[in-house]
Amino acid sequence: MKQKQNHYATGIAAAGLSYIIWGFLPIYWKLLGSVPAAEVLAHRIIWSLVFMIVLLALLGKWKSTMAEIKQLLTHKKQAISIIVASVVISINWLVYIFAVESAHVVEASLGYYINPLLNVFLATFFLKERLTKTEWSAVGIAAAGVICLTVYYGSFPWAALTLATTFSCYGLIKKKVSVGPWTGLTVETLIMTPFALVFLFFFNPNGIPLWDKEASIIMLLMGAGIVTAIPLLLFATGAKRISFTLVGFLQYIAPTIMLLLGLFVFGEEFTTPQFLAFALIWIALAVFSLSRIVRNTKASKQASQAQNPSDSSYTAS
């Protein structure tokens, strides 16, 4: 029993720490504010691959990962899916870095608050999952928040919606691809690294090679691989050990930290329409979360009654 509790506690700690790291990542990208977002992205991809290769070699996972990659490449649909996933997550990374560097951290946090609701919305169409009326109302309330911002500013909150959409699509694609997080990140960065190298050598508008930059910038660019891989691997470890419901609650840690950083560290503006939009989305998340708790509780009771029919009949009498 104690071992099971420790297993669960380790899961909470690992998943929670992954979201805390993701929440504080804007500080890291702000330190690279002098480097264009596209260049930061290219280095993030390349050094993520380098870090994963070193890590796999040190932990003795190289052979098993290579075997998994070979197996993946023999399935055409899965190979295409992982290529699409690589492009989608690269777009997500680029928009996120650009949002941070252009003082849109608050808007980025909005995107990750919307993300869980968009996940469910996409699941109804692609995974044939059914939503209750309450859950549909939560999606509608969140949509009202986005419309509120669009009407007030006269422009679409493209960064927030792009972040939410790309991350949701990435998650949806990964559900269809049966690879672990170690293999997934290695393959995705391996696919995108040739494009990153071509960009750096031939299309980089900055034109300054890595070795001619300041030492601090060089270290930060190389470290981008570490800050990308570590939280992802922590999350993968934690998610296996805790319930999906708990993961659902922990995922709000990251956008909450982002929002607080945007407001109190980076001094970004938080207007009345923004507050109204966030309020609507927070209400939507509360409605949705409560609906899921009730739904899961009912499902658990029904499952236990099915396993113990004698107990359930006794209770009913």
Image (cartoon, rainbow, N blue to C red):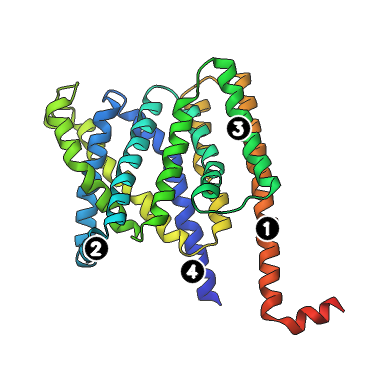
Q: Residues within 10 Å of mark 3 (few under 14, many from 20)?
A: some
Residue 305 lies in quadrant: bottom right
Residue kind at label 3, given as amino acid type: Ala
The spot of residue 158 in percent (x, y) is 46, 26
Residues marked 4 and 2 touching at CB (< 8 Å): no
Residue kind at label 4, given as amino acid type: His
Q: Compared with residue 225, is residue 263 higher up or lower down, i.e. above or below?
A: above
Residue drawn where x is 65% and y is 32% of the image:
280
Q: CA distance from mark 4 to mark 3?
A: 38 Å
Residue on which disc 3 sits: 143
Residue 216 lies in quadrant: top left
Q: Compared with residue 251, is residue 273 higher up or lower down, i.e. above or below?
A: above
Nearest the camera: 126 or 142? 126
Residue kind at label 1, given as amino acid type: Arg
Q: Residues within 10 Å of mark 1 (few under 14, many from 20)?
A: few
Q: Residues within 10 Å of mark 4 (few under 14, many from 20)?
A: some
Q: In the rendered view of the protein, which quadrant contains the N terminus? A: bottom right
Q: Compared with residue 40, is residue 117 higher up or lower down, i.e. above or below?
A: below
The spot of residue 299 in percent (x, y) is 67, 65
Q: Sequence-wise, which precedes: disc 4 or disc 3? A: 4
- In the image, 146: left or right of 50? right
User: Residue farthest to the right?
Assistant: 317
Q: Residues within 10 Å of mark 2 (few under 14, many from 20)?
A: some
Query: Which dot marks residue 295?
Result: 1
Residue on which disc 4 sits: 7
Q: Compared with residue 281, is residue 123 higher up or lower down, i.e. above or below?
A: below
